Every structure is written in structure tokens, then in C-alpha cells.
């Protein structure tokens, strides 16, 4: 158990240890008036949001309709209906067949896409700037006037069942579904996005109509445009095409059951993994609107990621990455900070061999506790810079910005600009990181899922004990 003693060691590595903190640097993010987010609300309560970029930079526009619904808004009886409904959106409307819809999109040189998450359903069209009106017309049509023919339903039923088999064969996807199932057991967030097979086989046209009536209402939707978009035009188009939406859902979602976190562990033995074990270990994180959301993002950057195949080894800035490379504890690991409305999951996903599962799990939780007590100023400053860089690169371009704006509007009701986010990151100091880490990581109940060789998987009481700070 030599690796278990690593938590008590003080490794002096020049790659990550400094006698003084790195100088704090604050970067200015200029947001011109042409890039300012504009928000309007139609008479029925539908919000229209745009963020126009300079015309010389972009000749394309991204238009999205974001619906504040996903698998967390479902019940055990209709789990999977949001995802099934998204599939049916491209199978024809009252005025467009599936073939004519496809030809219309292709002739514009556009792309039409959609996805469903646990909390959102998003329909997106990327078009040339002169085709914004056509994009809004198409999105409004597939959302409000889907035909839902019996033939289309049966066709997509088979597609989703095949998709389900593919997802189940992807270890990472399966592990995270299991993690949600045990971390939020008995709560809406425990449901998978695709739903169970028995639901997929039983959905009818009536189920989709009821779901649309309940969830596809103006108060739960946002129309977003980014790139070469004129806000006035977008508002007029939304008024013309979405004025018929019901203003309010007949269901009071404020009275719906909230997802409750429960610490627990699940092991699934699988002899097909050739001695490898895939593990996800998490604690309850912060929701989108929590003031702890950004500090947890900084902590995620401190913990970092590691992949044996990419090199770096002992020279990684991540202290956990350095340890894993030195002790050869895992093939790879990645940190995650998944946020939802009112809760979240903060954790680590790693792939290792069965005999090192115990050591690696211990080191992950020990690193969390170390950050709560012993994180350095240098680590915090480095993580802040890395976070600002990665956040800006991920949100660069109209499509990424459109998705981010839509999620923010339905989750917290406002746009958090890159400049605002950078300012919040700059305001974080070492004391804030230690305080937040103490609240979330010390003396807590982790949720852990292990798939593969689980013969050496530790007892849950032992895992629970690793969230304490032992000093010798």
C-alpha cells in the first residue's frame, strides 16, 4: 500500500512547486457594442437573444431554439420522450416532408441539428446571413408543426434502440449514466437521456403531443441568434413564427421534485476489459447559479487531466498528474465539473488496472482534500490562466457562443459574457479556493462507479475515510 502513503508526502518538484506565487495577471477582454448581447421579450413571454459579431468577421449566422426540458423533466413512465421527440423533428411537418426539408437545407448550404441533454433540448440551424429568415421559418416549423406519422415513429423507434446499444457499448457513456443513477437515485437527474427500452417501445403520438403541450411553451423557450445577425430582424421573425406558442406551461415546475444527491458506490464486474477498470468518482457539486460554480472550475483546472499516451509525465503542472505518471497509477484521468439547476457533480474519471483501483481512488480524493488545506498561490494563479484560456477558446465563434447563450438564458436567466467570466475568475484567490474545497470535498459522501476488474475495489467506508485530512 505504498501509494496510499503518498497523501502524506511532500513532493518537491520544480515543475509545480514554487517558493513564491506567480504574479497575478488580469487580462482585458474588449466587448464592442457590435458584440453586446441584446435581449427582447415577445408578448407571449418568449425571449429573443442575439449577439451580433462584426460583419467583416462572419458571413454566417447561427440560430437556435433552446427548450428548458430534458430527461430531468421526465418521469419514470415517460423517460426518453424528450430525446425521441427531438429525433422526430426532422421527419416531416404539416407543410414539409422529410425529403423536402433535407433538400431545402442542403440547397441553402446550411446545417440543421439538434440534441437533448438532461436539462435542455436544442435545435440549431447554421446558415448564410441572407438566409436567417429561412432558418427561423424551418426551426419554427419542425418544433411547432411536427407530423409525427406512425411510419416515422416506428422508424425512429428502431434508430433509437440501435443508438441505445451503441451507447451501452461505450464504457465512458455507461459509467456516467450509472454515476447519475446512484448519485441522484430516486430523483429526476437519475434518468438516462435515451430512456429505458420498454419506454421506447411503447411511446405513441399522444405521448409526444402531451409532452409538447407541457414543455414547449414560451416561458420555457429561448430563440438565440449569433454571428451576422440583426436583432431587430430576429425579433420580427420570432414574432411572426412563434407568436402562436402558449405563453405558460400548465405545469408548475417549481413544485416538481428536486434532485437529491446520495453518496454511494456501484461495481460492475466485466471480464471483457482485459484486467482494466474504468472508474468515476464524484462528490456533489454546485449548480449553474451557485457562487461556487466558478471556483469549482478553477479547482477542476488545478486537478487537471492526464493521458499516458500524450507524454508530459513527471513535468505536468497538475500535481495529481505528476503523481499518477510517477507511480504509474492510471492510463488516463480527466476531471469533470457537471452543473445542473441547483446541483452538480464534481469528480474524476480514470482508467487503470484492477490492482491499482484502490490506490488511484485514494489519490484522487486525497488531492481534493489537499486542495482544501494546502493548495498554493502558484497553483491557483496557473489554474486561473488556464481556465480563462480554455473557456475563451471553447466559446470562440458564433456556433459555440449560440449554444452557451441559450443554456445560460434558460438556466440562470441572463448572459454571462466572456469579459464578465474573466473578471469573476480574476477575483478568486487562494482562500476562496480553500474555502470552497473544504465545503465540497472534506468529510463528504462520494459517489463511485467502477466497471471492469473490480476484485480489488475498496470498501465504501474506506473510500469515505479518504475525504478526511490526516496529518502525521
Image (spheres, rainbow, N blue to C red):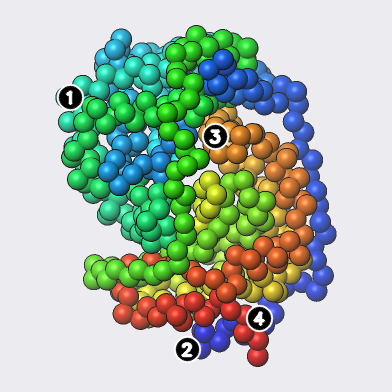
Marks 1 and 3, the one that precedes in the sequence? 1
Residue at coordinates 17% horizontally, 31% vertically from top-left? 154
Label 3 environment density (alpha carbons within 10 Å; few <14, some 14–19, many ≥20)? many
Q: How many marks?
A: 4
Label 4 environment density (alpha carbons within 10 Å; few <14, some 14–19, many ≥20)? few
- Is 58 or 258 nearer to us in this picture? 258
Residue at coordinates 75% horizontally, 23% vertically from top-left? 33
Q: How far apart in space, not on screen, are marks 4 and 3 (Cα)?
A: 45 Å
Helix, strand or loop under label 1:
helix
Quarter of the image with the C terminus is bottom right
Residue 225 appears anywhere in the view: no
Residue at coordinates 57% horizontally, 65% vertically from top-left? 312
Q: How far apart in space, not on screen, are marks 4 and 2 (Cα)?
A: 18 Å
Residue at coordinates 55% horizontally, 58% vertically from top-left? 285
x then y, percent, for residue 208? 29, 29
Residue wearing tag 4? 11
Q: How far apart in space, not on screen, are marks 3 and 2 (Cα)?
A: 48 Å
Quadrant position of residue 468: bottom right
Marks 4 and 3, the one that precedes in the sequence? 4
Nearer to us of marks 4 and 1 is 1
Residue wearing tag 1? 150
x then y, percent, for residue 125? 45, 23
Helix, strand or loop under label 3:
helix
Q: Which mark is residue 31?
A: none
Residue wearing tag 3? 410
Q: Which mark is residue 1?
A: 2
Amino acid at each position: 500500500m505504498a501509494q496510499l502513503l503518498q497523501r502524506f508526502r511532500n513532493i518537491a518538484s520544480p515543475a509545480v512547486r514554487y517558493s513564491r506565487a506567480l504574479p497575478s495577471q488580469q487580462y482585458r477582454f474588449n466587448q464592442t457594442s457590435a458584440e453586446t448581447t441584446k435581449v427582447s421579450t415577445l408578448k407571449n413571454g418568449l425571449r429573443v437573444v442575439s449577439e451580433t459579431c462584426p460583419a467583416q468577421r462572419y458571413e454566417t449566422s447561427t440560430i437556435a431554439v433552446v427548450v428548458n426540458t430534458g430527461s430531468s423533466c421526465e418521469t419514470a413512465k415517460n423517460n426518453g420522450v424528450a430525446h425521441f421527440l427531438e429525433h422526430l423533428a426532422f421527419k416531416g411537418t404539416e407543410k414539409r416532408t422529410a425529403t423536402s426539408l433535407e433538400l431545402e437545407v442542403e440547397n441553402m448550404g446550411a446545417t440543421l441539428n439538434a440534441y437533448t441533454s438532461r436539462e435542455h433540448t436544442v435545435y440549431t440551424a447554421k446558415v448564410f446571413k441572407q438566409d436567417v429568415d429561412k432558418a427561423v421559418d424551418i426551426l419554427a416549423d419542425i418544433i411547432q408543426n411536427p407530423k409525427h406519422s406512425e411510419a416515422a415513429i416506428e422508424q425512429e423507434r428502431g434508430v433509437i434502440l440501435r443508438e441505445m446499444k451503441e451507447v451501452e457499448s461505450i464504457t465512458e457513456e455507461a459509467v456516467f449514466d450509472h454515476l447519475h443513477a446512484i448519485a441522484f437515485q430516486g430523483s429526476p437527474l437519475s434518468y438516462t437521456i435515451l430512456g429505458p427500452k420498454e419506454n421506447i417501445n411503447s411511446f405513441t403520438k399522444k405521448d409526444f403531443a402531451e409532452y409538447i403541450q407541457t414543455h414547449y411553451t414560451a416561458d420555457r423557450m429561448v430563440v438565440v441568434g449569433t454571428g451576422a445577425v440583426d436583432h431587430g430582424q430576429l425579433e420580427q421573425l420570432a414574432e411572426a413564427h412563434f407568436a402562436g406558442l402558449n405563453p405558460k406551461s400548465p405545469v408548475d415546475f417549481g413544485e416538481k421534485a428536486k434532485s437529491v444527491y446520495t453518496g454511494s458506490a456501484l461495481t460492475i464486474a466485466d471480464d471483457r476489459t482485459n484486467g482494466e477498470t474504468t472508474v468515476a468518482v464524484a462528490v456533489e457539486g454546485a449548480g449553474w447559479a451557485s457562487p461556487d460554480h466558478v471556483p469549482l472550475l478553477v479547482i477542476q483546472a488545478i486537478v487537471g487531466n492526464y493521458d499516458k499516451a500524450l507524454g508530459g509525465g513527471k513535468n505536468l503542472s497538475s500535481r495529481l498528474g505528476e503523481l499518477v505518471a510517477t507511480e504509474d497509477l492510471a492510463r488516463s484521468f480527466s476531471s469533470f465539473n457537471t452543473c445542473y439547476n441547483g446541483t452538480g457533480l464534481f469528480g474524476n474519471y480514470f482508467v487503470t488496472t484492477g490492482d491499482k483501483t484502490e490506490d488511484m481512488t485514494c489519490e484522487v480524493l486525497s488531492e481534493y482534500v489537499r486542495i482544501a488545506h494546502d493548495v498554493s498561490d502558484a497553483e491557483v494563479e496557473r489554474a486561473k490562466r488556464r481556465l480563462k484560456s480554455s473557456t475563451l477558446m471553447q466559446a470562440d465563434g458564433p456556433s459555440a457562443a449560440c449554444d452557451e447563450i441559450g443554456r445560460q438564458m434558460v438556466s440562470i436567466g441572463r448572459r454571462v459574457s466572456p469579459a464578465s467570466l474573466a473578471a469573476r475568475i480574476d477575483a478568486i484567490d487562494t482562500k476562496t479556493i480553500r474555502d470552497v474545497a473544504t465545503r465540497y470535498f472534506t468529510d463528504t459522501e462520494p459517489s463511485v462507479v467502477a466497471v471492469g476488474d473490480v476484485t480489488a475495489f475498496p470498501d465504501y467506508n474506506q473510500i469515505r475515510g479518504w475525504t478526511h485530512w490526516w496529518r502525521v
